[in-house]
Image (cartoon, rainbow, N blue to C red):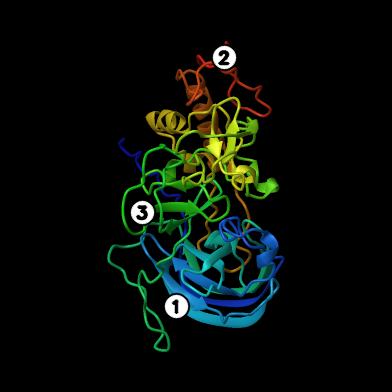
Amino acid sequence: ATGLPPADKEPLVYFNGTIRVRVIEARDLEPTAYAVRHLPSKQLLEVMDCYTVVDLHDDDSATRLLKTSVKRKSNSPHWGEEVTWEAHNSQKLVFTVFHSTAFPPDDFVADVNLSFDDMKPNWDTWLQLEPCGQLHVYIDLKGSISEEKPPEHRLQIASKKQPVRRGAVRRRVHQVNGHKFMVTIFRQPTFCSMCESFIWGLWNQGYQCQACTCVVHKRCHQNVVTRCPKLKVEQQVTPLTGARFNINVPHKFEEHNYMRFTFCDHCGSLLYGLRKQGLQCSICKLNVHKRCQPNVAPSCGVSKKDMARILMDINIHVGDLTKRPSSAKKSISGPVGAAETGSAGAGSAAASAAAAAAAASAGPLFVANRSTSAPMPAADDMSLPPPAGGVGGLT
């Protein structure tokens, strides 16, 4: 199966000047579903050894500004460490919290992305982390921001005390539709939850969401249409998307005995055991581990691959449906985070409405991928109308 083309990048503003960042403390941190997926109980990882990294991103690369010390056995660590940097044509700051493990790679805990038009000079604030937790930081900006495209081949100039490390961030978090995808090494045969084909390779074969553990190809991760179930409730429906593009058709899982080797349609790994190895949806025949059930998105009967292709055919990518407006200012002389929704918000809303209208007339979007005789469940919160007469198509 051929891969889907990557989604367009969200346009961001460019910052030039001096940036000072201090990571003070964090609170309410919890291990992710990925970190505890093989543990018999989540209580075995109640406390973590946390540290924070600060990355500065531009168009095509990222620079590691700061890596704090590791605070042992604390889910509310205190650091008080800072860094000063001369930034040129930078677009956003990324704060990522990791749990230091005995064997690498370290486990992802939470992160947050900040565009420079969301920041203020002398900004002391608590940042809401995803999927959970808060981070106390102090950010001081002295410079200017612009929406103009930076000149080509312009390199970042660092101070003498801190050498330039272009592209030094290896474990980058790719955020798509609320998912936190990171490159992952699979030590057993694994299938993609998006296109359902095998993930080939011996090293860094694909991407896995650190919050909900779903597995996808690198070529598929930019086109995942379902929202991450671990995304905070207040951010699942934004003012731009609203209820125009929202899939909420719950599965009906039941214990099932498998007579042959079967792989989980969520995390892609084998369902182990001799009897009642996993759960199967009685409607769409989706097969998952018992541990994966809380992490499965409510998309019963929806063909995710076909929906992504429909959006691609009308030149709308998944990122366009949740893109926030940009509000750039020419210089930082006051608060920079004032939201100016204006025409940008209207454009994103129109894109969402166009996607729903095109999908409604695109044909067999709702299909029972593994069974064509089961009736479809009622749609609890759907922007698209439920199918009529079983699984034949949309009305």
N-term-proximal mark, 2 vs 3: 3
Badge 2 local density, few (<14 within 10 Å), some, or many (20+)? some
In the rendered structure, which amino acid carries the disc numbered 3? Gln
Q: How many marks?
A: 3
Q: Is residue 195 left or right of residue 351?
A: left
In space, the residues marked 1 and 3 are separated at their CA atoms by 36 Å
Provide the residue designation for mark 3.
Answer: 205
Element at label 2 = loop
N-term-proximal mark, 1 vs 3: 1
In the rendered structure, which amino acid carries the disc numbered 1? Glu
Badge 1 local density, few (<14 within 10 Å), some, or many (20+)? some
Could you tell me if residue 205 is visible in this image? yes
Q: Front-most of 10 and 359?
A: 359
Provide the residue designation for mark 2.
Answer: 390
Where on the picture, by quarter, is residue 223? top left
Q: What residue lies at 40% left-to-right and 45% top-to-bottom?
A: 8
Q: Does 312 sit above or below residue 20?
A: above
Provide the residue designation for mark 1.
Answer: 86
Badge 3 local density, few (<14 within 10 Å), some, or many (20+)? some
Element at label 3 = loop
In the rendered structure, which amino acid carries the disc numbered 2? Gly
Confirm or deny contact between disc 2 and disc 1 (CB under 8 A).
no
